[in-house]
Image (cartoon, rainbow, N blue to C red):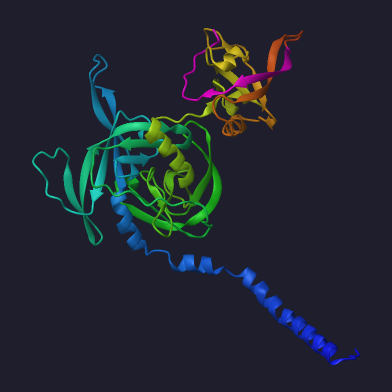
């Protein structure tokens, strides 16, 4: 290369220097992109000590005993309370609201909540609560038991909110699942097998899992952890490396009932929405068609491979007035005519009740949706059922309404 001026020579040298620097910096930049960011390193270095996490969270985790009524005699209507089970929960706020799983209190008539205080206040003669002392590690706690009042439940998310008349409560620090990654630490605190205030540790093993609620609805974005979750852990908190709650322990995947290192927790972001609505209104209002449906396994026995069979329709509800029909059942429990089979909601194909439920989650009461259904219109020679496809526009109703049978 020939350079005819000093200015040109300087330009060539500058260009060569720039190219050389890029050749050196490029692989370094590539290595930086493949290594953890400074923020990630900072997060890992600042995770709290597990013992500190436990001592800070222990006063917020409660022990729940549930009781049911049982008749004392076949010949008498007199009843007595009998123990049903035990579970966990945690303090939501200083006003006495306690959060637990719906399935912990689902069949209970009453529930007692035991709270651990990190001090030892003097007991008054007028104090109607039972109190005793226990030593959790290096900190001494005083246990007090309270009768809980049921505020509201959200079976779709396996959430229940209780309230106790207690003071000096320590709510858990509320975290968020956003920003957390698989492999980060997680801690479950609860009362497995009645062993109150037990903590197990593990990692976040998976995200965006899906499990079924007690009323067989899909719960999405569930956290998977290998921190042991055993019977009695239900309703307790799943904490992150900073001791903040990121989920509520709800189930363990096990064929024997014991822990297998596969546990699930309802994510705090969904949990917070349900809890705040229950505290405010005592109920959860979601958009619904105003029907009851048949589960996929039973529907398959009737020859339905795709779609959701309408069993019942709300009397005088918009769906009833729009012409949606339920299943007719005779006095012997035999199906005499199948109800409408929903195969599409707006542009969403409906394969099972899962797709129907998830499609309805996008709407609110009062919205209008278009349902595509298959409907029986009689039988032809040989007993074959004649079916036609019908489109119906339905106004969605609040899910808190009841259901009555339309088939006689």
Segment tinted magenta in the rendering = 384-408
Describe residue 240's horizontal placement relative to residue 384 as left or right: left
- Percent position of residue 274, x then y: 44, 37
Quadrant assignment, res 231 = top left
Q: Is residue 391 magenta?
A: yes
Quadrant holding the N terminus: bottom right
Instruction: Please provide percent x and percent y for residue 313.
Output: 55, 16
Q: 325 or 200, which lies in front?
A: 325
Looking at the picture, how far across and down is residue 102, in whole percent?
40, 35
Please say if 76 is above or below 84.
above
* Most foreground residue, 286 or 81: 286
Furthest toward the left, the residue is 125
At horizontal 52% and vertical 9% (from top left) the residue drawn is: 332
Q: Does residue 303 appear in this view?
A: no
Q: Is residue 32 above or below residue 47?
A: below
Query: Residue at image x 32%, y 40%?
Result: 97
Report the residue at 77% width, 81% height from top.
Answer: 19
Q: Please provide percent x and percent y for residue 179.
A: 52, 56
């Amino acid at each position: 290369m020939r350079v005819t001026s000093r200015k040109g020579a300087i330009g060539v040298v500058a260009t060569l220097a720039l190219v050389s620097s890029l050749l050196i910096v490029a692989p370094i930049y590539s290595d930086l992109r493949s290594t953890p960011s400074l923020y990630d390193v900072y997060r890992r270095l600042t995770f709290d000590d597990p013992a500190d996490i436990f001592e800070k969270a222990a006063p917020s985790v409660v022990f729940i005993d549930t009781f049911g009524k049982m008749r004392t005699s076949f010949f008498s209507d007199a009843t007595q309370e009998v123990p049903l089970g035990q579970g966990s929960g945690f303090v939501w706020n200083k006003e006495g609201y306690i959060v637990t799983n719906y399935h912990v209190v689902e069949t209970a008539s009453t529930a007692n909540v035991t709270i651990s205080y990190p001090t030892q206040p003097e007991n008054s003669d007028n104090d109607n609560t039972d109190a005793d002392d226990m030593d959790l590690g290096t900190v001494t706690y005083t246990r007090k038991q309270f009768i809980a009042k049921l505020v509201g439940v959200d079976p779709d998310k396996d959430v229940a909110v209780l309230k106790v008349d207690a003071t000096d409560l320590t709510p858990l620090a509320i975290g968020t699942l956003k920003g957390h990654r698989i492999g980060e630490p997680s801690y479950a605190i609860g009362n497995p097998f009645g062993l109150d205030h037990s903590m197990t540790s593990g990692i976040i093993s998976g995200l965006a899992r899906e499990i079924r609620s007690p009323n067989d609805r899909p719960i999405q974005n569930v956290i998977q952890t290998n921190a042991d979750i055993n019977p009695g852990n239900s309703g307790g908190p799943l904490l992150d490396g900073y001791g903040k709650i990121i989920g509520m322990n709800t189930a363990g995947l096990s064929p024997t009932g014991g822990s297998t290192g596969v546990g699930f927790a309802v994510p705090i972001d969904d949990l917070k929405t349900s809890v705040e609505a229950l505290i405010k209104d005592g109920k959860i209002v979601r958009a619904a068609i105003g029907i009851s449906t048949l589960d996929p396994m039973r529907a398959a026995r009737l020859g339905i491979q795709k779609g959701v069979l309408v069993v019942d329709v709300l009397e005088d509800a918009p769906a009833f007035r729009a012409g949606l029909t339920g299943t007719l059942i005779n006095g012997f429990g035999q199906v005499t005519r199948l109800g409408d089979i929903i195969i599409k909601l707006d542009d969403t194909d409906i394969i099972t009740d899962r797709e129907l439920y998830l499609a309805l989650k996008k709407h609110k009461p009062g919205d209008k949706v278009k349902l595509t259904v298959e409907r029986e219109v009689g039988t032809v020679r040989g007993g074959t059922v004649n079916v036609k496809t019908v489109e119906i526009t339905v106004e969605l109703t609040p899910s808190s309404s009841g259901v009555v049978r339309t088939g006689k």
